[in-house]
Amino acid sequence: MPDPIPARKSRLGLYLPFILLLVGIVAWTCVWFWMRIQVQDRLAAAQAGLRAAGYDIDWDSHSIGGYPFRLDVTLVAPRLRDPSGWALAASRLEGEAYVLTPGHWIVAAPQGLEFTRPRGGPVSMKGQLIRASLSNLDKRPPNVSFEAVKVAFTPAPGAQPFGLSTADRVEFHLRAGPDDQGGVFAKVDGGKARPLGLLARIAGDKPVAMVWNSTLSRMSAFTGPTWPRAVRAWTDAGGQMSVRNAGVTAGEAILGAQGGMLTVGSDGRLRGSLDLSLRQAPRAISALGETGAIAPEAAAAAAALTAARQQGDLARAALTFEAGQTTLGPVAIAPAPRVY
């Protein structure tokens, strides 16, 4: 009897894993390119929206890469200027998000930033690390963090001086909170005052530090095509800023606020008051008058006021913003800061 012909074995089990892997790679590639198109469209929409609101925003070129697991966006020579004259520019900005968490972006400025003050002119900012993170962009406010480490500030030729020459660390954080609130926190550590400037007159060669910790209410109302319209909508809805802790330490001199409530008036200037504690206030206020930060006669009156109220090494007074004026106790010292 002849031997039976053996049954031919199927090789599907051998090739199936490779077929599934190939299908998965093709599907993932399609998803990545779809997300790349989404990023491209949102970048163009954001640029068009800011231009329609009166902002000047542009860049020389851009690219989107990072396949297969990241979305990397690089902007060459980006620049943004608002209608009031504030501007921000960089030689290069690099943004990165993972495909699985596309709502969380890390942005770095490896060659530094340049910010322009409406009256003071441009200031270059370069450091060991300058980066920001953005997340929860659908919330109001979104989560925003900025940090700069070992940073140096250099005014452009012809620009007005800047208060600090260097700082060990600069931080800013914006967070969404419960009950329609938002938190704002900022800090400067290890600052060095610019020689011959106001802070140098107060601090000498000692470090300068700053802190600001506050809570914003009615954040859902903070909306509008431009900064002024968003602020007006927020104040019309009863939005306020509750200051928990704020202060400046310049050498031995300290200006601290342990509480206060602020908002914005219809003229765009700050309104409200802060409860201040001041150490070495007469000397610091006199320096304000000597450098022209406030009028000399107002500085003299404010210095006399704080000297009269000093108990031990501290003086207490209310800093009030009302009717377009800033007053320390009963002494008008300067116009109220303009928010828009």
Image (spheres, rainbow, N blue to C red):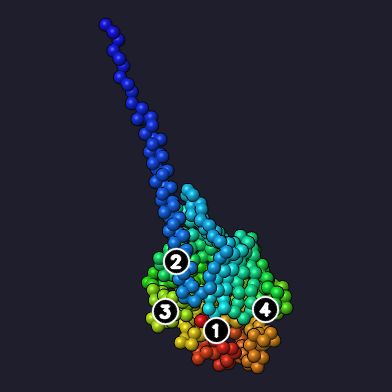
State the residue in front, 262 or 310.
Answer: 262
Amino acid type, residue under disc 1 in the picture: Pro
Residue 337's tag is: 1
Q: CA distance from mark 3 to mark 4?
A: 33 Å
Amino acid type, residue under disc 2 in the picture: Ala
Residue 160's tag is: 4
**Residue wearing tag 2:** 45
Is residue 238 placed above or below 65 in the rendered structure?
Answer: below
Element class at badge 4: loop
Element class at badge 1: loop
Query: How crowded is the residue under tag 1: few (<14 C-alpha within 10 Å), some, or many (20+)?
Result: some
What's the residue at 52%, 87% (across, down)? Answer: 321
Q: Are marks 3 and 4 in contact (CB under 8 Å)?
A: no
Residue 11 makes an appearance in the image: yes
Q: Earlier in the sequence, mark 1 or mark 3?
A: 3
What's the residue at 42%, 79% (across, down)? Answer: 234
Q: Position of residue 274 (x, y in %)?
A: 52, 83
Q: CA distance from mark 1 to mark 4?
A: 19 Å
Query: How crowded is the residue under tag 2: few (<14 C-alpha within 10 Å), some, or many (20+)?
Result: few
Q: Nearer the viewer, mark 3 or mark 4?
A: 4
